[in-house]
Amino acid sequence: MAAGATSIDELRSHIREREEEIATLEKEIRTYQDSLEKTGAEANTLSREINSLDLRIKKLNADIRLTNNKIKKTELTIEKLGIEIDEREKDISNKKNTMAELLRTVYELESETLVEILLSHEHISDFFDNLEYLSNLDTTLKDNLKELRELKVFLEEQKFETEKEEKQLVKLNTDFGAQKNIEEGIKGEKSSLLKTTKQKEAEYQKLLSAKEKQRIAIETEIAEIETELRLLIDPASLPESRKGVLASPVESPFITQEFGKTAFAKAASDVYGSGGHNGVDFRASIGTRIFAADGGEIIKTGNTDLSCPGGSYGKWILIQHPNNLATLYAHLSVINVLDGQNISRGDLIGYSGNSGYTTGPHLHFTVYDARTIRFGPSKSGRCTLLPYGGYLDPMGYL
């Protein structure tokens, strides 16, 4: 028992150390995030873009170290809980043995009649001492039973906590793998940018101009097609507009651009040819977990950057739900699901990013009437595969 207690104390000490490291890393990550937000407000130059990519790499490296520390802390917690569970099970076994002995003693004493007990004692005082002993045994038995019940409750709580920590460990390991992939992707993006621009500002601005023209053309084509598809929406067969029909696709949701004719959409009429935004944008730094807004089937996933880099949605996922709604998740860095896969509400489906056309990392979220969904290339053929549909106001369902 003493050895176990020492081991638990050591584990608690290691857990505290991990918690201190986690707090330090979280502070470091906030600093990088603040720097990224300041950089995002600066003029779009090659040096700014390189600086931004460097900051993202540093932040992701800190994210990876943070996740690794959380993994170690969770492993230590599971180990500590395992020792505590073993000790509680031993305590329960000892209590059961003690109670069995007490029950046998009580049974033996109570099997005799009061006359037999009285005759077996030389003095009357001994008789009353025996009765008091029997009463004390009964009290001890009740106390042991109460302690046993408390131990069992505590044991169940520890087992539940262990299961929760084990699930968390699975999630953290998934995050760790994704973050490593994202970091490598951004390093590759930086390398490609330096090679393409030859580290010259003029080349970078030429590249930006070409991407801008491509992006305007693609967004205009999408707007034209989706304006037609909106005529196919059947409101009568869609869920009633109310909060909670769909869950938020991100934790702690904060909307950076709303649906429809927003100020940004009107100002960037070249971006939104119809003057309206076909979804909502959620604040989501690179590597943020993205969850399914409802259960359903992964109809299709794609990556527009393969055929029209920086021109549209980037990496995207489209889910069809049983209630005739479909949801689109765009600008991802990692896709964690496969076409045709069935998923449940709240399942992790990917990680946010900066793919496609963005003015900064975020999640673009669109809700469609599922029966209006179409897939195909853009009219000009610039993008080989795009999702289209009659879009709805997500805020009517979130």
Image (cartoon, rainbow, N blue to C red):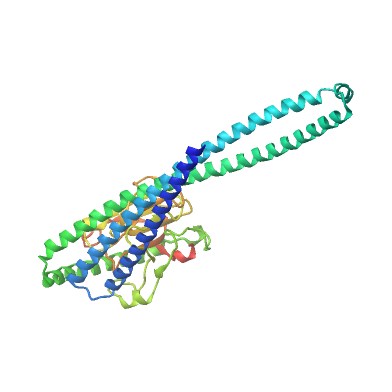
In the image, 68 versus 205, the foreground residue is 68
Q: How many marks?
A: 0
93 over 228 or under it: above or below: above
Residue 28 relative to residue 1: left or right = left
In the image, 339 versus 26, the foreground residue is 26
State whether residue 172 appears in this view.
yes
- Check the image and name the residue furthest to the front: 123
Q: Name the spot of residue 104 as percent of width and height, x first.
A: 72, 25
107 over 262 or under it: above or below: above
Residue at 35 percent across and 48 percent down: it is: 174
In the image, 182 versus 71, the foreground residue is 71
Q: Name the spot of residue 229 as percent of width and height, x first.
A: 37, 62
Q: Name the spot of residue 301 as percent of width and height, x first.
A: 32, 52
Q: Name the spot of residue 36 as percent of width and height, x first.
A: 29, 68
180 over 86 or under it: above or below: below
State whether residue 372 appears in this view.
no
Residue 260 relative to residue 209: left or right = right
Residue at 68 percent across and 40 percent down: it is: 146
